[in-house]
Amino acid sequence: MIITAIDLFAFAALLGVFLLVFILKNKETPKAVTFIHGPVAAIGLILLIIYSFQYRPAPIASLALFIIAAIGGAAISVLDITGKSIPKWLALLHGSLAVAGFIFLVAFAL
Amino acid sequence: MKKTSVWKDDAEASHYSPLQTDLNVDVAIIGGGITGITAGYLLAHAGKSVAVLEAQQIGGGTTGFSTGNLYAVVDERLYILQSKFDTDTIHDVAASRTAAIQQVENIIRGFSIDCDFHRTPFRLISETEDDTSTLQREYQACLEAGLEAYIDTMAPVPFYINAALRIDDQAQFNPMQYVKALATHIQGTGCAIFEHSKVVSIKEGSPNILYTENGSVTAENIIHATHSPKGIMAVHSLLGPYREYVLAAKLNSGDYPEGICWVLNKPHHYSIRTYTSKSGESYLLVLGEPHKVGQKEANEACFDSLEAYLRRRFDVKSVEYRWSAQHYKAADSLPYIGALHPKSSVYIATGFAADGLTYGTLAAMIISDLILGIKNPWSEVYAPHRHNPLKTAGRFIKENVNVFAQYLKDIPYHADVETVSSIVPGEGKTVEIEGEKFAAYRDESAELHLVSAVCTHMKCIVNWNEEAKSWDCPCHGSRFTVDGQVIEGPAIADLPKKETNNLP
Ligand SMILES: Cc1cc2nc3c(=O)[nH]c(=O)nc-3n(C[C@H](O)[C@H](O)[C@H](O)COP(=O)(O)OP(=O)(O)OC[C@H]3O[C@@H](n4cnc5c(N)ncnc54)[C@H](O)[C@@H]3O)c2cc1C
């Protein structure tokens, strides 16, 4: 389960980097990528939550980071879809938290 | 053949000046279609100060591109509503719609409006045994809804029928003449009407403020009488926008059928009626071929199918007019009429399907009662904040899965064409330039019109509407001109024009 979560987060991260480039260049994000990035990351997070309930020790640090990143991601999507400008710092923070969560998760799994 | 509605051609142009100042009124109404003008009349008549802001011309929205039928039943069938809700609900629907038709008649008689209003039978016609069973169910529902309905084996049409459901005393009129005439009667009697006054931003609160390019209106209450409410609202996730096509033809025989005829043809029906213009010319109107807005390529073919349908049943001499327009289907099949939430001073009137001349009038009656503090017997049935998760779920899921699928078509580095040079005159295509999508149209004089292809409502990619020469959003039905100006739908902002020297 944790390996599947890592795979999903890795895929979501690739798409996330792609989206970040659009945001940093003040361009419209391609919605096909946005709407794949979000659900893929969300499934990864759900798997991680299930894992954390089922096994001990749980990857608490990475789980916390991913949850905060997910809240940021949801806020970014709402801003994007409703036509408001996305603060670049928020996009960078969201990405950084997710990357940190990913590193912690890989370290935990190894 | 004229590419406009027979109503528009048969009505005089109105000339109301645009809003050029800042106003303060009790009620500001966005939209001068049947909903907005009727609400303006009712509220001004009750002593409220009212301003109607119309982006284009009075009646120039869907009202002026409808088919002018007024009936107590509904497009989606009473028996389906009954199975979703209950008998009380269809009773309310039939009673409220009958009252709205009476309201239209009272207004016409009160102001002596010349708009070809006449009482006439409504018929739902089946041509096959199979459709007759649908018809029987509708007949039963009509009786249970309190309507006096009959089953006939004949109807005044020149083709074979299996059975017809008849309801007498329904009505027809010229909707454009009606709305324009009502507007002239209410202008200055507590109601100020402004044309070419597009609301470009809305500040909700107390008070609410509507901004147009050259003025603003501050109001205690605002009514979105724009068919689909403006801006981003949860209700848009409960609406499915559909486009339909209309032909007006002349017949060789001169034998035009009377009444409102809906001919069953699964999964929809064709709506047929006769209209005789002020100059005495008769036309046979046929409406049909619905599809989701922005989701039909080569939609000119809809007119061909409609004409073929008509020619199979009538001795068509020539097609004189053709037009298209759109309507919005509600998730639970009942329109959303009233305040956004119980304490809100913002009112909406939407989800009428193709029944909105009657529902629009009813919406004006309900909303004006709500604003005036008068108890309306039907306000709860249509309240926008009703909670019907089970009744709503089916269409809500279907429409929103469809919207999601439209978003998934916004694939990076992928558009209709790679270079604008491949777009021929009269054609519109999306093209990707420096990582962004543009909607490019080359007009007949080969000039290129380039605007962003990202809908300003909720960022779907717009699609080319070949027939209307417009950019249509496949998600929530916003439509834009080739230069990006909003035509209709929930979008408020125009598609930005893109200047770029770097054209592929
Ligand atoms: C092809 C077709 C045939 C139909 N036939 C029938 C029929 O026979 N019987 C029936 O009952 N119903 C029929 N309907 C449905 C009916 O026509 C509509 O539901 C009804 O006309 C809606 O009226 P309305 O006033 O709410 O909207 P509209 O008539 O669309 O008026 C809305 C107005 O708002 C204005 N507006 C929009 N945005 C702004 C803005 N930002 N600022 C200012 N103004 C703005 C528009 O310009 C427009 O004039 C038909 C629908 C279609 C598509």
Image (spheres, coloured by chain):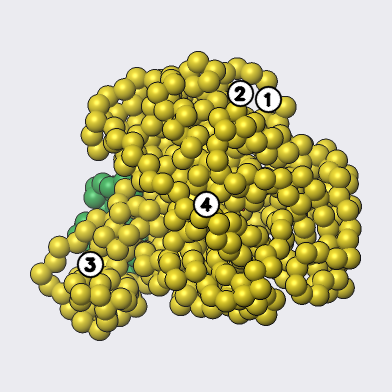
Chain colours: A green, B yellow
Question: Residue at horizontal 46%, vertical 45%?
Answer: B59
Mark 1 / mark 3, whichever is N-terminal: 1
In the rendered view, tell whether residue B380 sits above or below residue B481: above
Mark 4 / mark 2, whichever is N-terminal: 4
Residue that numbered label 2 is attached to:
B369
Q: Could you say where residue A39 lies in the image, as x and y percent from the top left?
A: 49, 61
Question: Residue at horizontal 72%, vertical 27%?
Answer: B377
Looking at the rendered structure, the kind of residue marked 4 is Lys
**Front-lying residue, B442 or B84:** B442
Q: Is residue B413 left or right of B321 when viewed as pictured?
A: left
Crowd around label 1: few <14 · some 14–19 · many ≥20 (10 Å): few
Question: Is disc 4 placed on a helix, strand or loop?
Answer: loop
Mark 2 / mark 1, whichever is N-terminal: 2
| Chain designation of label 2 | B
Q: Could you say where residue B46 lies in the image, as x and y percent from the top left?
A: 54, 18
Q: Which mark is residue B278?
A: 4
Residue that numbered label 3 is attached to:
B449
- Say if mark 1 contacts mark 3, CB within 8 Å: no
Crowd around label 2: few <14 · some 14–19 · many ≥20 (10 Å): many
Residue that numbered label 1 is attached to:
B376
